[in-house]
Amino acid sequence: MSADPGRLLGDLYRVDGLLGRGGMSEVYQGYDERLGRPVAIKMLRQPSIGSGVSSTELLELQEAQASNRQRFLREVRMAAQLEHPGTPAVYDTGLTDDGRIWLVMQLLRGSTLESVLDRTTYDVDARPTIAWATAIAAQIAAVLTDLHRVDVVHRDIKPANVMIVENGLVKVLDFGIAILRGASALPRLTQVDRTVGTPVYMSPEQHLGRVVTAASDVYSLGCLLYELLVGDPPYLDSSGTPVRAHHLQSPVPSAAKARDDLPEDLDGLLSRMLDKEAEARPTAEQVYAGLAPLVGGVSAGGDDVQDPTRPFRVPLLAPRPRPAEPGHGDPLTDEEFVRIQNGAAALMADDQQNLAVETLEDGLTRAAAEPYFTLELGFQLGMIQFLRGEYRAAAAHLTMAEETYRARLGDDHPRTVQCAFYAGHAYAELGEPLKALAQLRFYLQHVDSTEPDNAEPLLESRFVIAQMLASDSRPEEARAELEGLRSEFRHHYGSGSTHVKNLERQIEKFAEG
């Protein structure tokens, strides 16, 4: 079902023509009646269910739609927090009468990098300048730097997801994979044979279905920069060798061999960005620092309004987040402590997450002199941060809470075990396998496995442990862990379930790797 042209959303935004459609959402051109400006409106799609659909298929569609809705909400919240000039501005959000979520964003006018490359010739006498290519890549690196600071991984950097607008500013688009398909960097149990990313630009770890981190975005940017400089991505299907095998096994190609005017420093940086090992790649900020001087302050496009070298007259990297301001007020009383706990819980129930976090952070500042208050508020804040996808902050708070609960209540206390579970999954999301393994193995040792409510968390944790073993370069142990889950998955979810199918697919990937 599509939006009706001319209808008003929230009594403010007129829906005009359809701009594009993806697997989970549609984007329309719209108009802000109050402020008199054109906007883009993104709306979650409703699945079309044809006749003859089995009850099992219907259930899977309903589960997928519920999951997509939660992920869309996460995209809305995450997008609203991004303030970098290289990401589209978010203006508003709401619900239609039939419950569809909509997001009003800045309407961008320009050209996607994909269309620019389609019009670009790479003949020796006419190919783009080094400044042009590095200016585009540096701007993308600046956006990624800002995203990675808040533990967001884009996971689909490619020419179609980059737009050059007036004044040469580069905008990174489509956070659908990063957020709509789960901010989680891990393959989920219900994802069956789903490729997360675009194969030509995907990192080796993405092709293997392993943990995806900020380094994966750097690899994808390396593929894109190589294409900007040479005319083609570094790896394509060739003579019976699929692109996946090239990303996993083929030597890193030298752009300098295809372009003799390439500076040696740039060729070296590009090679490091395309390293097979994620740990060997530079950070996005280091990429920016290496590329920005190569722009040279020289216009790459003459009078072209989309000249990407123009924005280098001002700094591109967003400022680091300012430290939180000190709290105020006297130390907490018992009554205020209870009020803060209950208030934060009520705000979460009312979907006011930012206010819940602010309430707890203020309470923590005032609770500094009272260890019990600090412990309980820190635990509550860590849980909320986990739900918001703020995994680094969540891991810090939950690890600290777990250590205190262990000392006071013992290893087997439910609160200790709960902290270990969420801290372990937070570290997994961050791509820190050793910390994740320590927490999740502790959880498995001390959780009450006879409690029915713990059945799925146990299976999920063992699945993630396998991912962490693979991420720690222990593929045989990872595969053995997954194979050990076969019978339990079949018993718990059913032999034909999506969970079992995905488990088998993950085992096959480790065998192929």
Image (spheres, rainbow, N blue to C red):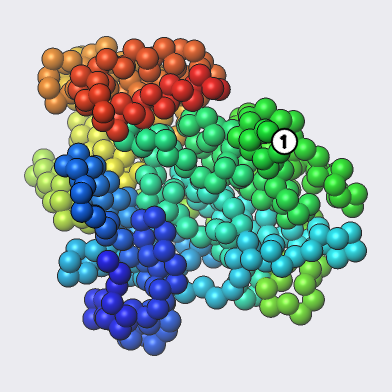
Q: Who is closer to the viewer here, 71 or 311?
A: 71
Quarter of the image holding residue 41? bottom left
Quarter of the image holding residue 237? top right
**Dot 1: few (<14), some (14–19), or many (≥20) neighbours within 10 Å?**
few
Which residue is at a point 60% across and 35% down the rendered structure image? 244
In the drawing, does residue 330 fall left or right of residue 295? left
Which residue is at a point 27% across and 53% down the rendered structure image? 69
* Image location (x, y in percent) of residue 347: 17, 53
Badge count: 1
* Image location (x, y in percent) of residue 313: 71, 69
Which residue is at a point 47% across and 40% down the rendered structure image? 195
Q: Who is closer to the viewer here, 7 or 283?
A: 7
* Image location (x, y in percent) of residue 149: 50, 46
In the rendered view, would you say 231 is above or below 211?
below
Regarding residue 310, the answer to whether it shows in the image is: no
Which residue is at a point 51% across and 45% down the rendered structure image? 197
In the rendered view, would you say 497 is above or below 217?
above
Regarding residue 492, the answer to whether it shows in the image is: yes
Disc 1 residue type (three-letter): Ser
In the drawing, does residue 447 fall left or right of residue 273? left
Q: Quadrant of the N terminus?
A: bottom left
In the drawing, does residue 303 fall left or right of residue 19? right
Secondary element at image label 1: loop
Residue with the most extreme front position: 52
In the rendered view, would you say 122 is above or below 155?
below
* Image location (x, y in percent) of residue 96: 22, 69
Q: Who is closer to the viewer here, 293 or 482?
A: 482
Q: Who is closer to the viewer here, 283 or 262?
A: 262
Q: Quadrant of the C terminus?
A: top right
Which residue is under mark 1? 239
